[in-house]
Amino acid sequence: MQVLASSLPSKEEWNLSKDEWKARLSPESYYILREEGTERAFSSQLNNEKRKGTFHCAGCDLPLFSSDKKFDSGTGWPSFWDSIQGSVETKVDFKLIVPRTEYHCSRCGGHQGHVFNDGPLPTGKRYCNNGLALRFVPE
């Protein structure tokens, strides 16, 4: 089953204040989703998640990735070779001086991770995601 992001509630419903986000999220998830932080490699239980299901944004519950697009990248973060159509938006990030492509949930703007061009076929992409920015929903 393919879920399209366009069939879900709009961005406007997720334009929350800093205090509202802090009340909704754990301090660790807030740091990643709202302050564009990164969790320690190999710290997420979702890195080893192998069941069928969908990975949702931990901020607003938007479905972002299907389990059939997940792969073991060896990097220590949950990695996917494609996202659900319309679920993420990208921007260039210069935090490490070298430009990287950062991606966010298209609905609430929550920071998820970075996308690289070293993933498997058919896309060649590696969406390297923070586990604390995700919620897994088993099939």
Image (spheres, grey):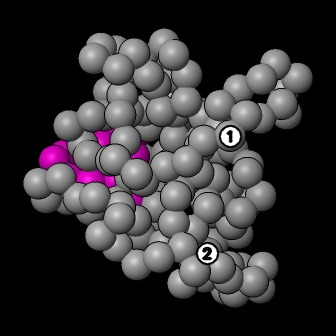
**Depicted 40 relative to depicted 52: above or below:** above
**Residue found 88% across the figure and 23% down from its top:** 97
Q: CA distance from mark 2 to mark 1?
A: 23 Å
Q: What kind of residue is marked 2?
A: Leu
Return the disc, 2 or 1, that comes first in the chain's sequence. 2
What's drawn in magenta, residue-wise?
Answer: 46-56
Tell me the SS state at disc 2. loop
Residue 92 x, y percent position in the rendering: 73, 34
Circle 2/circle 1 CB separation < 8 Å: no
**Depicted 2 relative to depicted 92: above or below:** below
Residue 91 bears which disc, if any?
1
Q: Looking at the rendering, which quadrant does residue 63 occupy?
A: bottom left
**Residue found 44% across the figure and 37% down from its top:** 78
73 with respect to 23 (left or right)? left
For this rendering, which residue is in front, 11 or 52? 11
- Which residue position holds label 2? 25
Packing grade of label 2 (10 A; few <14, some 14-19, many >=20) is: some
State which quarter of the image contains the N terminus: bottom left
State which quarter of the image contains the C terminus: bottom left
Q: Nearer the viewer, mark 2 or mark 1?
A: 1
Tell me the SS state at disc 1. strand
119 with respect to 18 (left or right)? left
Residue 46 in sight: yes
Q: What kind of residue is marked 1?
A: Lys
55 with respect to 98 (left or right)? left
Residue 35 x, y percent position in the rendering: 77, 58
Packing grade of label 1 (10 A; few <14, some 14-19, many >=20) is: few
Residue 6 x, y percent position in the rendering: 35, 64
42 with respect to 37 (left or right)? left
Residue 132 in sight: no
Any magenta on residue 53?
yes
